[in-house]
Image (cartoon, rainbow, N blue to C red):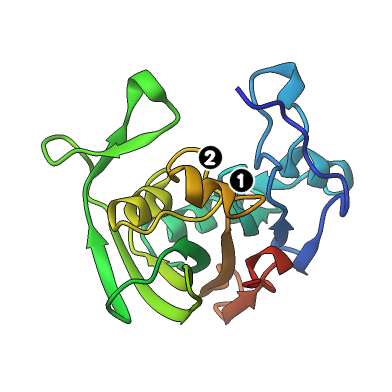
């Protein structure tokens, strides 16, 4: 079990806000919501609620993943936003730096996933009882030993992008759960970033497109 040492700078970063919801930029290493252990009390949600006590978490990012996360400012908006996410009406884009160079410029990974209970929170591919899981990907650039990919999850399973990249033979650099030793050592953190969200505003019906700048850690040396 790794010691929980969440970053404190910036304390919280608001990318977008209005009277209906907030969109935050979560740093890698910070939980989306508090854990059961008192040592895991610090989280993006609890930090935001110190200034916006009405804010309610709509969806989550893995602790090691950075990027865009939405919090509603009322129960009614929370219900509407949750429905958008559940019905796959939110277009999500992630950027990942992975081990190696895919031979194709784009593709998809269609592999069913289920929790690996003896090793939770890890997930695994299971063709018999796994839930359908689909990820589309596009190659942005490559270096001698790694590639920057745009990942477009169609479904939203736990650890989906991380397991699908591992199954493709290109684990995400710095992944403490799924990367082999060389890929783990190749980055100081999991190089997975929730870079864009696009959806129809549940109150104004305006289509919003919000982006987050890629952290410096993703730059190839």
Would you say 128 lies left or right of 155 here? Answer: left
Would you say 192 lies left or right of 102 here? Answer: right
Q: Total of numbered circles in the picture?
A: 2
Q: Looking at the picture, how far across and down is residue 58, in whole percent?
A: 57, 49
In depth, the one of 180 and 52 nearer the eye is 180
Q: Residues within 10 Å of mark 1 (few under 14, many from 20)?
A: many
Are the residues tagged 1 and 2 within 8 Å (C-beta)?
Answer: yes
Q: Can see residue 58?
A: no
Task: Estimate the spatial distance between the alpha carbons at disc 1 and disc 2, rounded to whole Å.
Answer: 9 Å
Image-quadrant location for residue 83: bottom left
> Pointer 2: what residue?
176
Q: Earlier in the sequence, mark 1 or mark 2?
A: 1
Above or below — where is 195 with respect to 30?
below
Q: Looking at the picture, how far across and down is residue 2, in whole percent?
A: 64, 27
Mark seen at residue 64: 1
- Mark 2, secondary structure of its residue: loop
In depth, the one of 86 and 64 nearer the eye is 64
Q: Looking at the picture, how far across and down is residue 73, in whole percent?
A: 71, 53
In depth, the one of 148 and 150 nearer the eye is 148
Taking the spot 88% from the left edge, 51% from the top edge, the residue there is 9
Task: Please identify the residue farthest to the left as the structure is shown.
Answer: 128
In depth, the one of 168 and 29 nearer the eye is 168
């Amino acid at each position: 079990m790794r010691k929980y040492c969440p970053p404190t700078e910036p304390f919280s970063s608001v990318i977008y806000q209005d009277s209906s919801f907030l969109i935050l930029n979560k740093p890698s290493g910070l939980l989306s919501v508090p854990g059961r252990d008192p040592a895991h009390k610090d989280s993006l949600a609890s930090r935001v609620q110190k200034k916006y006590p009405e804010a309610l978490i709509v969806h989550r990012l893995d602790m090691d993943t950075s990027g865009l996360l939405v919090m509603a400012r009322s129960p009614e908006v929370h219900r509407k936003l949750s429905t958008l996410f559940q019905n796959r009406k939110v277009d999500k884009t992630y950027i990942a730096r992975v081990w190696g160079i895919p031979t194709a410029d784009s593709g998809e990974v269609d592999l069913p996933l289920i929790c690996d209970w003896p090793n939770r929170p890890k997930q695994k591919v299971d063709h018999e009882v796994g839930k359908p899981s689909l990820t589309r990907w596009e190659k942005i650039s490559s270096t001698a030993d790694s590639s920057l990919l745009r990942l477009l999850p169609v479904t939203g399973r736990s650890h989906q992008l991380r397991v699908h990249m591992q199954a493709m033979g290109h684990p995400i650099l710095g992944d403490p759960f799924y990367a082999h030793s060389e890929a783990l050592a190749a980055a100081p953190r999991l190089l997975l970033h929730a870079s864009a969200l696009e959806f129809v505003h549940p109150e104004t019906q305006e289509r919003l497109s919000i982006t987050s700048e890629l952290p410096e850690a993703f730059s190839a040396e």
